[in-house]
Image (spheres, helix red, strand yellow):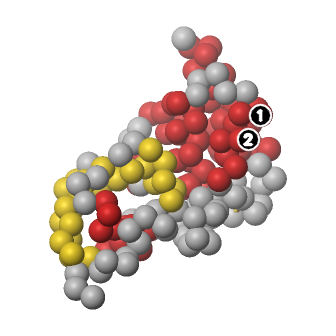
Amino acid sequence: MSNHNISLDVNGCLVEASVEPRQSLADFLRENLALTGTHLGCEHGICGACTVFINGVPARSCIARAVSCEGDEIKTIEGFVDDPWMEAIREKFSSEHALQCGFCTPGMLVTAYDITKRIPDADEARIRVELAGNLCRCTGYKGIVNAIKGVLKDQKDVS
Ligand code: FES
Ligand code: FES
């Protein structure tokens, strides 16, 4: 099958590339752009380890095709490095022991960013529902939920 030329924005940079029609966005990010912070677990859209933002919405990059992202804005975990909101989330993940092996963590952080921005009044039950698409084999989720609750509480306290 012949390659397709695509042009997209990745972490604020214009990227132009020639991709095979079946290449996933996750493989494109990891193999073509060396953005290996996007992890691959199940590669079936189940575990959430590969979660990135596509046009501001969390999406599983293992089941998105790179060729389908023509013209899109992609934000990977590397794209949040200077983001103060993500820094606050990372600090809470650390203080609440919300990671052990860290394999799920990039996807968890991207999802946590979405939850804390989109649902400022989320209670624990809602946080757990929103996290249902991100699997963690290590933590039992309590630390992750507490970290997100902590970010939301801190935001309420300063507002
Ligand atoms: S690797 Fe994409 S959802 Fe599991
Ligand atoms: S910290 Fe190991 S899978 Fe989540």
Residue 142 figure quarter: top right
> Taking 88 as reference, is 131 left or right?
right
Q: Quadrant of the C terminus?
A: top right
Name the residue located 39 percent from the left edge and 50 percent from the top edge: 54
Q: Quadrant of the N terminus?
A: bottom left
Q: What kind of element bears circle 1? A: helix
Asked if 125 appears above or below 44 in the picture, the reply is above
Kindly identify which residue carries mark 1: 125
Q: Position of residue 2 (x, y in %)?
A: 22, 85
Kindly identify which residue carries mark 2: 128
Q: What kind of element bears circle 2? A: helix
Name the residue located 66 percent from the left edge and 35 percent from the top edge: 148
Residue 17 figure quarter: bottom left
Q: Assess mark 1: CB under 8 A from ligand 2? A: no
Badge 1 amino acid: Ala
Residue farthest toward the front in the current orientation of the protein:
1
Asked if 130 appears above or below 29 in the picture, the reply is above
> Taking 23 as reference, is 132 left or right?
right
Front in this rendered view, residue 150 or 21: 21
Asked if 26 appears above or below 140 in the picture, the reply is below
Label 2, label 1: how many angstroms apart (C-alpha)? 5 Å
Q: Residues within 10 Å of mark 2 (few under 14, many from 20)?
A: some
- Is the Cβ of the residue at disc 2 closer than 8 Å to that at disc 1? yes
Name the residue located 69 percent from the left edge and 36 percent from the top edge: 127
Q: Residues within 10 Å of mark 1 (few under 14, many from 20)?
A: few
Q: Assess mark 2: CB under 8 A from ligand 2? A: no
Badge 2 amino acid: Arg
Residue 91: in sight, yes or no?
Answer: no
Name the residue located 37 percent from the left edge and 78 percent from the top edge: 22
Image mark for residue 101: none
Q: Position of residue 29 (x, y in %)?
A: 37, 67
